[in-house]
Amino acid sequence: MKKNHLISGFAGVAGTILLTASLAGCSILYPNWGTTAKPADSASPSASTSVAPSVTPTASPSPTLAQAKAQISLLDSGVDVAGGNVYAVGEVTNVVEDGGVCTLTFIGAGKTKTVSGTAEANATDTQCHPLQIALAGLPKGAGLITISYESPTHKGTSAAVAVTIP
């Protein structure tokens, strides 16, 4: 009887050790479990001292980097009469980044109205948050809507979509 009790006690201890070892392995695979820090974030502030940079005069201003073309696709758009707005949802198909701005533009009967919102990286693209322009004040009849996107690295505008304001 004592032999079975010894074996079951050993199995319990071995199971606990195995469970502890497997959970400890998680900290190796996920060293920042539960943190909101990104891999590019510094773990601590720099303790180095800074030296004032020397200024070298130049004859011409330094060139800025040109923004690459952003390819924007409208996923859904239209006029929501019950909701009282023109709406659009778009995505930037050739960029995966945070920090850009999407702008919905309505043009109709010589009037232009815009609204902007943030964009955020998705797994394979950049999603524009849903954008809406109130119908109040928009001219009745035919109009066009587009979504444009701009970030420090990319800029572009979608193809225009026709809408009819009732």
Image (cartoon, rainbow, N blue to C red):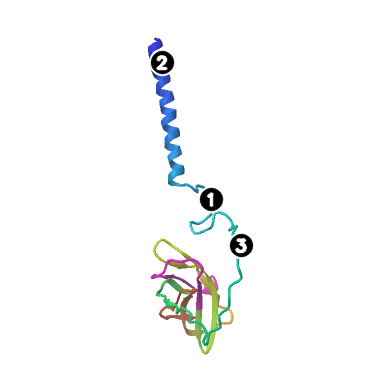
Image depth: mark 3 or mark 1 in front = 3
- Label 2 sits on a secondary structure element that is helix
Residue drawn at point x = 45 percent, y = 73 percent: 77
Which residue in the structure is indicated by mark 3?
A: 49
Residue drawn at point x = 44 percent, y = 44 percent: 28
Within 10 Å of disc 2 (Cα), the crowding (few <14, some 14-19, many 20+) is: few
> How far apart are the alpha carbons under marks 1 and 2?
43 Å
Which is nearer the N-term, disc 1 or disc 2? 2
Exactly how many numbered labels are in the figure? 3
Foreground pick, 164 / 147: 147
Residue extent of the magenta highlight: 79-104
Residue 120 on image: x %, y %: 48, 65
Three-letter amino acid code at the position of disc 2: Leu
Residue drawn at point x = 52 percent, y = 48 percent: 34
**Is 86 above or below relative to 61?**
above
Does 98 appear in magenta?
A: yes
